[in-house]
Amino acid sequence: MSMTALFTGRSASDGGHETDVYHYAARKGAIEAVDVAAADLGIDVHLVSQAVQHLVENRLLRADAATIGRYVPVDPDLAVASLVSSVEREIYRRRELIDQIREGVGFLGGGDAARSTVDYLVGDLEVRGFLKTAGDACRDELLVLQAGIGEAGDLSQMYLVLVARGVTVRVICQHRSRADVATRLAMKRLTDAGVEVYTVSNVPRSAIVFDRSLVALFGDGDGDVSLARVRNQGIARFFLDMFNHLWESATPLEGVEFGYGTVADDLQQSIAALMAKGYTDEVVARKLGMSVRSCRRHIATLMRDLDATSRFQAGVEAARKFLKTG
């Protein structure tokens, strides 16, 4: 975003001197006094005062808490980020207010359908704004189904803030997170802070449940970032049940060691079940969220251990073996 955009089109020709005043502050390191800046710039002190006020409103200047009348310049990129964040929050506070009004009308009318809302958010700005607002409002528990590797870093800051506030945060991600170095390190930071992270063979779709009532169901990853925001107790209960079912069979992520280690049996069982259905290596790898190369390595180990002569035989024998020992 340009400085002109921040100033909403104002320029010296229509009485705005923000650019001159900002450049002056950046050059001097600060505006020590408005009247001194006006004299140095050769601009009426009233106009400089207006420009300073406008720059403060746009986060490009900040008042020095230690010295009255002194203003310090702020990096434009930081100013943009601050403005965008505040605009996002305001947008979604208003959306929350609209939802509360709808819920109130629903109670008057009676019937759960009137109180159910589903809307779709598309685009990084919309999705990030919603997640910030929903995270700010979360007071008790956050449950996360995480299908993608990259999402750990994207949402980790929200998890850390919530845990620091005393909110319980539980995350279920795929076993492949154990073998990805960047993701493993990000996950360790979360577990060290108090986030509970478990892994399973496959998470079909990413979703977040805020305080057992608000569900955010993410898109499939194709095209723009998107999610469906759902306020419906029946759907929320479904996701809670599914989360708890996966949690019971998941394996906790502990330490910083890389690789599949403690989840090897569970992973092989999932691979065997898919092989027994006749899926190709590529399909098995895609369903388990791993590379085809890694998948083929696991299949080769499975076939060697079972002394199988075909993929199908290995799948059937492995499935039978795990069924007996399960």
Image (cartoon, rainbow, N blue to C red):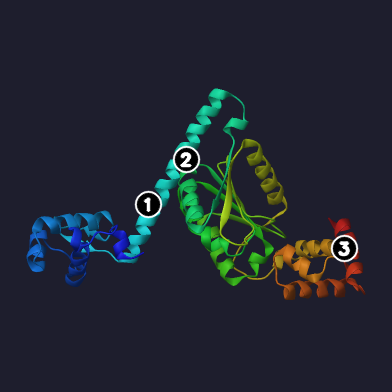
| Residue occupied by mark 2 | 96
Q: Position of residue 182 (x, y in %)?
A: 56, 70
Is residue 53 shown above or below 306?
above
What's the distance in space between the residues labelled 2 and 3, CA to CA? 48 Å
The residue lying at 23 percent from left, 55 percent from top is 54
Q: Secondary structure at mark 3?
A: helix
Query: In 3D space, how far apart are the residues under numbered discs 1 and 3 (Cα atoms)?
Result: 53 Å
Give residue 31's position: percent from left, percent from top.
15, 64
Q: Is residue 161 visible?
A: yes
Q: Which mark is residue 86?
A: 1
Q: Which secondary structure, mark 2?
A: helix
Label 1 CA crowd tier, 10 Å (few <14, some 14–19, many 20+)? few
Q: Quadrant of residue 60?
A: bottom left
The amino acid on which the numbered mark 2 sits, given as a three-letter code, is Glu
Please, is residue 170 above or below residue 9 in the view? Answer: above
Q: Which mark is residue 276?
A: 3
- For image coordinates 70% across by 72% down, the residue present is 291
Quadrant containing the C terminus in the rendered view: bottom right
Circle nearer the N terminus (1, 2): 1
Q: Where in the figure is residue 172, as x and y percent of width and height?
A: 64, 55
Question: Which is more foreground, mark 2 or mark 3?
Answer: 2
Q: Amino acid at mark 3?
A: Ala
Between discs 2 and 3, the one toward the N terminus: 2
Badge 1 vs badge 2, beta-carbon distance below 8 Å: no
**CA neighbours of label 3 inside 10 A, class few (<14), some (14 to 19), many (20+):** some
Q: If the image is split into quadrants, where does the N terminus sit? A: bottom left
